[in-house]
Image (tube, coloured by chain):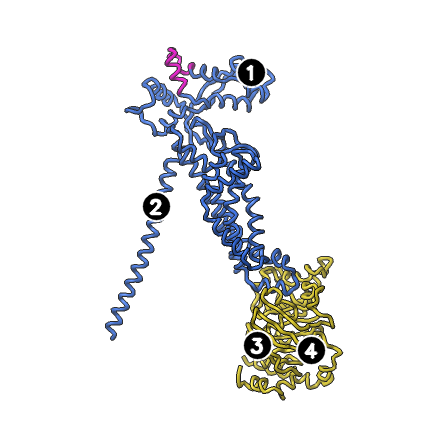
Amino acid sequence: MGTVMTTENFRSNEPIARILADEPEVSTVSSGADIKMATKGVDVFYGDKQALDDISIDIHSKQITALIGPSGCGKTTFLRCLNRMNDVVDSCRITGSITMDGEDIYAPGVDVVSLRGRVGMVFQKPNPFPKSIFENVAYGPKIHGLARTNDELEEIVMKSLTKAGLIDEVKDRLLAPATGLSGGQQQRLCIARAIAINPDVLLMDEPCSALDPIATARIEDLMWELKENFTIIIVTHSMQQASRVSQQTGFFHMGVLAEVGTTEQIFQNPVDTRTRDYITGRFG
Amino acid sequence: MIMTNEKLIRKRNRAEKRFRAYGVLSLLAAGSVLLFLIYTIVSSGYSAFFRASMLLDVQLDAALMDVAPPYTQDVLLQGRYGTVVKQALYAQFPDVVARKDRRDLARMLSPGAEQSVRDYLIDHPDRIGSRISLEVPLSSDFDQLYKGYLPRSGDYVRFNEAQLQWYDRLQQEGRIHYRFNTQFLFGGDSRYPELAGIGGAVMGSLFALLVCFLLAFPLGIAAATYLEEFARDNHLTRIIEANINNLAAVPSVIFGLLGLAIFLNVFGLPRSTPLVGGMVLSLMTLPTIIIATRASIRAVSPGIRTAALGMGASPVQVVFHHVLPAAMPGTLTGTIIGLAQALGETAPLLMIGMVAFIADIPSTPLDASAALPVQIFLWAESAERGFVEKTSAAIMVIMAFLILMNLLAVIIRSKTQSKVE
């Protein structure tokens, strides 16, 4: 257990330290030049019930944005708007604008399938396909036509598994069923699967909530590395996790975005009283 | 306080023991009824798989058989073999000379004896002109006598004294043989019990099931997938769903009437054929397949669906790459159970004329044919003693098919379960 503690301690300090050391990156938060996705006045209704009210947020490129807030506050609903996963819910209605690289992703001509190819998603519960490890990762490149030959496909799979930090554990059993992996391995496989189609944005919906601290630490390390190439938006219940990994944090409360700012500012100097109460543990 | 507790515990323990005993008892009751059923069918049916025959020395005289070279199959099929068979029989019993006695003697042999000679010659045309020893079937009455089903004496005796003497003499000479009856398994139906076979009915049932599977399986999966994955939840789909469930409870004879009215009278499809039989059975099997497929589609973990959608798979890709493969074991199990039901179904087949007496074995689904359950029905109605064992044996054959199909369903289920684990 001793080693685990040291890893945790080491890790939890690292992101904050980097943010503090990396002044220019923090200052670009409001510059607007590197905004990957932006929402303006987004309202979401399930039938007559309003789930989200006037959400406006800029998501910065190649950064990790954490969305925190109490259960049922609309974080996941918001996340699912960003790759139009709410489309499959018949009663769901969305107004306002969500843009990616300046283009409206809800415009009539937009192909949902291609959009989801650019905005990947990792879910709360690890959900590998009941197929082999190889096939799990190869599925995305196959349906999106990213590999012309089997060699290319294999290369993509190996690269994705390497990036997801899973390669050493599975390289001898690529054809074994993915369901035989441990929970943490399955979640990293899901991340490998998501990055295999080389999306611009990676949405993560509480990716560590079903995992133990060691597996969580590995995923957080991984996110830190993936940030170099991907824009990541993570929904999390763990404020420690948000403060450890993210550069920008949004606090949701009862369907509204109560406050958004740099992670440092949100955790050290929140403006909104609800944010302060939540972060100091007075509710939620 | 402790005393009442102990009382309560004893009472509870007794109640649990009693409940277990009820369970064991009901299992025993159900099991013994089943065992009794199987015992009665097997004990009265197993003898139909064997047949008593007589070793006959036949002089294959081309002139008497009315055949001339070249001895091709067509020529031999035109030949007459009654005379040589009778001559061989009379030669066996030179002391029998009176016309009436000779007639009684000839009645000991089945009409199938001539077919035996013909079939032998088709296989060995070079033996024409020589003398051969051939096993030819005994008539049904003597077959039943050999098996001990008919009495040698009493009010209902079907043999005269002379016949019984000849029969005993043949047995002493070792000329009566008891062999496995391949004609029963592979032959067509016949008016003569000793010649009747179940091959035509088996082929008819297999063709009908094939047609039924080819129609009901794709249609059922398509309907279930559409209802479960694509259709909007509105009044129309709810009415369709309710009616599919109702359809599963409609008496099968109604489907037969529908088939008669539409497939035969409107479309003018050929009567008594496995094609129409399979079409009618597919109407019955469809709701079963749709219900089983929908249940197994619903059981597919929603995580797999969202994962695939999140990867950028289109709804159709989600269904074909993930949902249907995961649902396939349940679908196949439901399909096999539906087909097993269809295999045992009689009433709709009676309605479309598959109840006719057909001796030929069908070679395509368009040939008129019987089906297994209808064959059982036909033989059970027949008066001859010989058909009693045939009826039970046909039930054994249909049960063997049902057990095989259910075994297949169990194997599919257990295989996929071990895969998931």
Identify the residue at image location x=57%, y=52%. B223
Residue named by callout 2? B33
Pointers 4 and 1 in contact (CB under 8 A)?
A: no
Q: Can residue B190 be seen in this view?
A: yes
Q: Mark 4 lies on which chain?
A: A
Q: Is residue A284 magenta?
A: no
Residue named by callout 4? A58
Image side of residue B140 versus residue A111, left or right: left
Span shown in magenta: B90-107
As drawn, the residue found furthest toward the bottom would be A269
**Does label 4 or label 3 sit earlier along the sequence?**
4
Can you tell which of label 4 and label 1 is closer to the viewer?
Answer: 4
Image side of residue A116 versus residue B78, left or right: right
What is the letter of the blue chain?
A: B
Q: How far apart are marks 2 and 3 (CA)?
A: 62 Å
Q: Do circles 2 and 3 both sit on a common chain?
A: no
Q: Do circles 1 and 3 both sit on a common chain?
A: no
Type of amino acid under label 3: Cys
Residue named by callout 3? A73
Say how many tags the image has: 4
Type of amino acid under label 2: Val
Assess disc 2: are there few (<14), some (14-19) or many (≥20) residues with their C-alpha within 10 Å of its C-alpha: few
**In the rendered view, would you say B264 is above or below B224?**
above
Can you tell which of label 2 and label 3 is closer to the viewer?
Answer: 3
Type of amino acid under label 1: Val
